[in-house]
Structures are given as C-alpha cells and as structure tokens.
Image: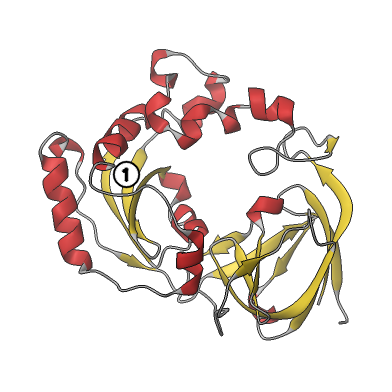
Amino acid sequence: MSNSNSGIIKKLRSQLNEEVQYNLPIGSDFVNLNPLIGNNIKVSFLDEIFCIKCNNKIKKTFAQGYCFPCFRDAPETSECILRPELCRAHEGESRDMQWSKTHCLTEQHIYMSFTGNLKIGVTRSTQIPTRWIDQGATKAIILCTTPNRYLAGVIEVYLKQFYSDRTHWIKMLSGNFEEPDFDQCYQDAKKHLNEKFSQYILDSEWIDINYPIESIPEKIKSFSFDKEQTYEGILTGIKGQYLLFKENKVLNIRKHTGYKIRLDY
C-alpha cells in the first residue's frame, strides 16, 4: 500500500454515470474509490469522533454524525426529516426558518424505488438521484411533486397503506430478489394517487442505477469501528453507503460519519 489519507469522514459522495462513481470525503480530501475495487485496502479508526455540525469532539454520535445538543436543536435533525408529515415550516414553525426555506418550502418529490423491495419516500429535487443511490436502489421513479415537505409527507403516509417506506439493507446488498413488472408498479401507484392527489402526479420514467460491484459477499456481516479498530481486506464493490469486502464483511460509511479514519490503499 503506497497511498494513505486520514481525517474525519463523511458519507460517500456519488455521481450517476453508466456505473455509480464514488468518492470518500476524508479530512480535506476526496478519495476516488472506484479504482480501488479489486485491491487490498486498510481502514483504521484513530480513536476520535467529531460532530459534523459544531465540530466538537464527542464520545458517540447521534443521527449519524451529530453530538446530542446538535441532534436536539439543529434543523438537519428535525423530526420532519424522517417524518415529513410532521413538518410545520409552511405554518412558520421551524428550528431554523432560513434553513427550512431551502429544505422544506421548496419542491419535493414522492418517489418509488426498488432496493430489493418496492418502497416509497420523499426527497428534494436537489437530492435526486443522490437519495436513491444512498439507499442502494437499482431503479427509481418520481411519482408526484409538491410545493412543500408537509404535503409530500401527507401523500407518503397515504401511500404507506400500499407500499413500504423501508429499505432492508441485507436484502439490498445481497441482490437475492426477483424484480417486479416495473411499468405495472408505476401504473398501480398512479391509480392509488388518482383517488386523492391527481393534481400532483408527474409523468415519469424509471431510472436505472448500476453499482461498481465485482462480487457480493455470500454471508453479509457488518463491522463497526465501535467494535473493531482496524479492518483490512479486498474491496469487491460499493453499493448505497456500503463498502463490500471479499471476506463477507461490509462497512456502512454513513454510520461512521464524524469518525477520524486512516485509509491505506
């Protein structure tokens, strides 16, 4: 191994091409991970964790990268992030209205994606296709568009009676699933929406997402820097926010946001 980088890591940056391109933010650098697939790499935890909001040194993170005070008070960790229907920014209520103007009071999409199972979700226009890639979706489509996060949440809650809003990460990584008739799935979703929300339906097409994977672990075992200080192995692929290794191990990068890491490659 002739190269190394160290610093605080954040979630993987991605770009949708014929195959998703991944970069790891580490310290002030970005390491292009795609060329490392098929090679031996070593990741080591340097015993320090920092809040990605206030940069204070902490012992543990909340909501993937925050200290407890920021988790409690920051707009990025508001309850409406996970439950859009609870958003009240359209009524003037928010932890930070300036933040909400660019995150909650802007165009929102309700989408359907396939991550081993069909699921629905809500995201901003600026987060497409990043949101889908982060979930490890192989296909995704926009169902409808709303002017604010609250209304998108209301529609999502309505659709939950027909579809899941969860990604099963082991199933997603394993690739052990059968694909449905996607065109029929889209038409069925539009029929459900036509009953109450026809004015928000958007005519769309499915987007295909291909990941840089040489091989998938036979038995998926996640490892964490809270339990293992160092891991070394052959990188066989990347999907969602996971690094896949030949020895059946996977590392969730997003879960370790704020951790100070050394990467040798």
- Horizontal side of 6 relative to 40 (left or right) equals right
Give the tally of numbered discs. Answer: 1
Please state the horizontal and vertical placement of residue 192, each as a whole percent of the image: 14, 44
- Horizontal side of 30 relative to 136 (left or right) equals right
- Horizontal side of 182 relative to 17 (left or right) equals left
Q: Amino acid at mark 1?
A: Ile
Estimate how packed mark 1 is, as few (under 14), some (14 to 19) or many (20 or more) residues with alpha carbons within 10 Å. Answer: many
Please state the horizontal and vertical placement of residue 254, each as a whole percent of the image: 64, 53
- Quarter of the image for residue 33 reads bottom right
- Locate the N terminus and report the quarter of the image it occupies: bottom right
Relative to the observer, which residue lies in front, 197 or 118? Answer: 118
The residue at the point 58 percent across, 78 percent down is 217
Residue position marked by numbered label 1 in the rendering: 110
Residue that sits furthest to the top in the current view: 92
The residue at the point 20 percent across, 69 percent down is 181
The residue at the point 63 percent across, 68 percent down is 221
Helix, strand or loop status at disc 1: strand
Please state the horizontal and vertical placement of residue 76, each as a whole percent of the image: 59, 33
